[in-house]
Amino acid sequence: MAQYDIAILGGGPGGYVAAIRAAQKGAKTVLIEEESLGGVCLNVGCIPTKTLLRSAQAYQEVVQAARFGVVVQGEVKVDWAAVLGRKDKVVKQLTGGVAQLLKHNGVKVINGRGTVKDKHTIEVGGTAVTANNLIIATGSRPMMLPIPGLEEAAASGAVVDSTGALNLSQIPKRFIVVGGGVIGIEFAALFQALGSEVIVLEKFSILNGLDKDVQDLMRRILKREGVQIFEEADVQRFEGSTVVVKVGDEVHLFTGDAVLVSLGRIPNTEAADSLGLALEGRGIKTNERMETSVPGVYAIGDVNGKQMLAHTASAEGIVAVENILGGSAQVDYHKIPACVYSFPEIAVVGLTEEAARERGHDVQTGTFPFAANGKALAEGERDGFVKIVADRQYGEILGVHIVGPYATDLIAEAANALQLEATLSDLAQTIHPHPTLSEALMEAAHAGLGMPIHVANR
């Protein structure tokens, strides 16, 4: 007789959400976590980075207070130790909250490294934990490519990954970012706002995969703010805190007080070894039910490699539990929003204009700039836009791309529009409160219909 109905290996945003939902549905549930509850997201990812970014934003608000008619006397300084202390306090509060929620819902939590012995058995500290069903939620780790000198530079502390960048002893005077993806750009924005000289080295183009209009605008804004960006930059080797890079036919040497290597993440698939689970790319292969190649074993979150986002992991966790308990649920990955917490923020959901055309859609777009939005001007936030990608035949919204203030909050309305298969007319006819930033979505829909209100028709 199994001890539990469901055993979950990994207590990140996929694992702990799955555990709570399983317990709510009446399943006897155990959650096994080697380190701290909350996984990468709460401990060394989403939450601590956003907490640091808010401190940087507060600093810039004071530095630029004169724009709003506010006079600040004396030198404005950043107390880095206090900034890190606030970050740690927020993390502790949230991870403690997760522990309380698990306890409240009756989830058994076991702290320790779990080793999968078979589809029903996990060994933790010499003790066997058995369950009818297993959910693997072991997350991912930073990827380190075999670049000459990188391993030695990382071992000496001359180079850090994203976790190390969260705990630098001081704000670097010169901060080098190798990798211009989401994580790299967020850290570039953070330290630029705190006064560092920032250099971004990207092998392809920054924010690769996002809508071209989004990429182009963010490139211009980052450069305007002083971030040096080198694209199509091929890193040759690391010499301590010096990065040797070939850009075109020229070789450059960049030396920083801190060097962040952000080249993506790789799933932690060790749990798959003992079970012989099929892999897809670098992740554990799952079907639409989140079930692996072994019946009764499920894989959610970063470990399946589908979409490495905390909210995707949570959604997958709920889907896995629903299916284990006899339901029929699945995740529509085309309708999951993604966010970049830069300055300004970026948020997207659905298809880019390029992808929509590649799929054969007769595309129409509508764009509205925040420079024409009253609330944005009042906030002093002119940069950015809302762009809607739609199918011309019925006006169905295929994708929404936002660069601007509070983009990461505004995108939820767009995600809901895609979920409901809304059209440009649906969004244009939805009366939005004035003055708000959310009006930009309505205005972009009007523009997509060829009848913009607060910008000239083109």
Image: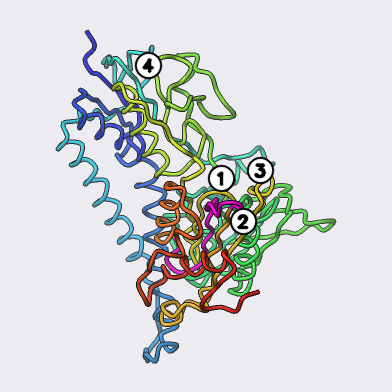
Report which quarter residue 23 is drawn in.
Answer: top left
Q: Which mark is residue 296?
A: 4
- Residue 430 magenta-drawn? no
Residue 172 on image: x %, y %: 51, 65
Report the Cα–Cα distance between label 3 and label 2: 15 Å
Residue at horizontal 43 percent and vertical 70 percent from the top? 439
Residue 172 in view here: no
In the displayed structure, does residue 94 sit left or right of residue 334? Answer: left
**Residue found at the far right of this picture:** 249
Chain part drawn in magenta: 391-407
Residue identifier under label 2: 211
Q: Residues within 10 Å of mark 3 (few under 14, many from 20)?
A: few
SS assignment at label 4: loop
SS assignment at label 3: loop
Give the foreground label among 3 and 4.
3
Residue at horizontal 40 percent and vertical 64 percent from the top? 430
Amino acid beneath label 1: Ala
Q: Residues within 10 Å of mark 4 (few under 14, many from 20)?
A: some
